[in-house]
Amino acid sequence: SYVNAHGGYAAAPAPAPAPAPDPAPAGASPEREPNDGYRAANALGATGCGALTAGDQDWIHWSIGAGTTSYQVDLRATGDAQVKMWKLVNGQYVQIANDTPTSFVKQSTSAGTYVLGVWSASGAAQSYTIALTK
């Protein structure tokens, strides 16, 4: 009776809709399947975009020339996607430490090829964009 006297039961609010994915940046290279392994990695220009299906992973590669070069890699996703990166050095892949789970701000002192792995920690489907500045 107390609840009814003071307005009754409140209805639960409707859940917020899932965020719409950001549109791909102008000139972004779209992901091409299959790219679920580092040997089938897509090339990355200044920007790229893609989508993870449930349990998916995507692989992307880029290169840098000789000399000292600063670079930054940033991943933006509509979910919990993360990125890891490796550099091919003398025939072996060496992992590059992340600055955050979605970014790297580093300096290279030698030419090389890098591979990036993008995946969702929860295995959730989502879209993403990735930017490379060097």
Image (cartoon, rainbow, N blue to C red):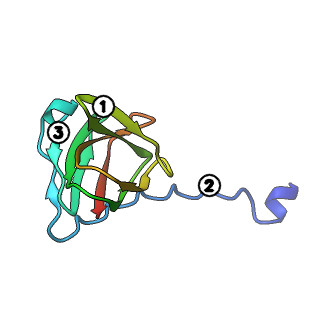
Classify residue 9 by image quadrant. bottom right
Q: Which residue is drawn at 76% across and 65% down?
A: 7
N-term-proximal mark, 1 vs 2 = 2
Instruction: Point out residue 52 in the picture as x, y percentages from the top left corner.
Output: 28, 42
Task: Pick the quarter of the image with the N terminus.
Answer: bottom right
Q: In the rendering, which numbered label is found on residue 12?
A: 2
| Residue ID for mark 3 | 41
Separation (CA) of disc 1 from disc 2: 52 Å
Looking at the picture, tell me which residue is in the foreground, 89 or 119. Answer: 89
* Above or below 107: residue 123: above
| Residue type, numbered disc 1 | Tyr
- Residue projecting furthest to the bottom: 26
> Are the residues at dot 1 and dot 2 in contact (C-beta closer than 8 Å)?
no
- Judged from the image, the secondary structure of the residue bearing numbered disc 3 is loop
For badge 2, the amino acid type reads Ala
Question: Quick one: label 1, few (<14), some, or many (20+) residues within 10 Å?
Answer: some
Q: Residue at x 17, y 71 (%)?
A: 26
Residue 77 appears in the figure: no
- Rendered view: 92 above or below 121: above
Query: Residue type at mark 3?
Result: Ala
Which quarter of the rendering shows the C terminus?
bottom left
Which numbered disc, 3 or 1, marks the residue closer to the eye? 1
**Relative vertical location of residue 95 with respect to residue 130 in this rendering, above or below:** above
